[in-house]
Image: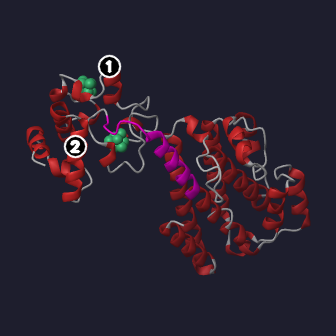
Amino acid sequence: MDKNWSDKNKQMQKLLAREKTFKEGISTLLELREELFSQITQIVMTYPKQAFCQMPYPKASGFHNKTLAYSIWHIFRIEDIVAHEMIAEDRQILFSKKYDKSIGSPIITTGNELAGDEIVEFSKKLNITKLYKYASNAKDSTDRILQKLEYPDLKRRFDEDMYRKLQESGCISSDEKASNLIDYWCSKDVEGLIRMPFSRHWIMHIEAMLRIASRIRQLARKGIDPIAYCGLSCDHCFLGLYCGSCRTDYNVCSNATMSPDGVCPNVKCCREKGYDGCYECEELESCQKGFYVPSNDGANAAKAHCLYIRKYGKKELLKVQDRLHKKFDFEKTQEILGQDLKEGLKILENN
Ligand code: SF4
Ligand code: SF4
C-alpha cells in the first residue's frame, strides 16, 4: 500500500478513536479521500474512453484483474449503498440523481458477482462521463454525511431490519461472490464502516486502478516511435511514467491536456502539415506554438533536439540522451542543455 496513504489512514483511525480528536480524524479522512479521488480524476481526464474497458491483468489475483470502469462503478456503488441506505438512511445518489438511467449500466448492484469477460462487457456499456459524475456526486454526498457525524455515532450498530432492507434493495447480488457483503457491513458499527469502505476500500481499488492505467499506457507505447513531435525523447522524459506519448491516445503532457481538444498544438500542427515532427519544419526556429511558447524554459532545449535530429537522426539523439543521463542526474533536458538553442545543440554534439 502507498506509504503516504497508509500512514494517513492509520493516523485518521487513531484520531477518530478519541472524542477529543474525533473532528480532526474526520478532517484527515476527508483529506485522504480528496487525494485519492484526484487520482481517479486524473485518469478520467487524461485517458481515452476505450481505456476504461481494457483488462490488462485478466489472470491476476489482486484487485487489478478488473477494468478502470468497473473499479469506479464498484467503489461508488458500495459507498453509495453504505452511506445512504445504512448511515444516512435516505435515497442513494444512483437513484436520486437518476444515474441508474444515464450511466447505461445493466445492473444496480456492486458488481461483485461479475468476473473476467463479464466485467469487460459490462464496462463497455458504461458512459464514462456520467459514471465519473456519479462517483463525484457520491463522494461529495458521503463527505457531507461524514462531516455531520458526532463521536457517539461511531458506535451505532445495525439490526435485522437493516439486514432485510439491504437484501430487499436489489443492490447486492445473491451470487455467492457478493452475498457476504451484507453480513460484513451489518457486523460493523459506523466506525468499522468508515474503515471499510470509506477509506481502505478506496485505497485498495485506486492503487489497483493506477496499476491497470500504467499497464495500459505501457502497452500503448510498445513499438511506438519514442521521439515526440516536439523533439523531446519520451524514453528520457520525466513524465514517461505517466504519459503514454503524444503518438498515442495516452498523452498526458500538459500541452495536450490543457488544449480544448486534448491534442498538443505541436502534434496538431505537424499532422496538418504532414510532418513526422517539428524537426521537419522550416519554421522551427521562430515557432512559438505549444511546447515552444517563449515562457516555457524547455522550448529551446526541445528545439535543440530537433536541430540535432535534422543533422544526425533520431537514433543518435536517443544515444546522446542515454549518455547524458548516465553522466548527469537531471529530470528535464533543459537542465543540461540550457536556454540557448545553439548552445544546446553544441552540448548534444559534444556528448
Ligand atoms: S510529455 Fe511529451 S516527451 Fe514526455 S512522455 Fe509525454 S509525449 Fe513524450
Ligand atoms: S509550425 Fe511549429 S508546431 Fe508547427 S510543425 Fe512547425 S515547428 Fe512544429
Residue at image position (34%, 29%) is 267
Dot 2: element: loop
Which span of residues is magenta-colored?
Answer: 207-228
Residue 20 visible to the viewer: yes
Residue at image position (23%, 48%) is 321
**Which amino acid does the dot numbered 2 rest on?**
Gly
Look at mark 2 in the image and give the residue it sits on. 298
Residues marked 1 and 2 touching at CB (< 8 Å): no
Secondary structure mostly seen in magenta is: helix
- Quarter of the picture for ligand 1? top left
Mark in front: 1 vs 2: 1
Dot 1: element: loop
Q: Say which quadrant the N terminus sits in.
A: bottom right
Residue 296 visible to the viewer: no
Residue 33, compared with residue 217, is above or below; it is: below
Distance from label 1 to label 2 (Cα)?
A: 24 Å
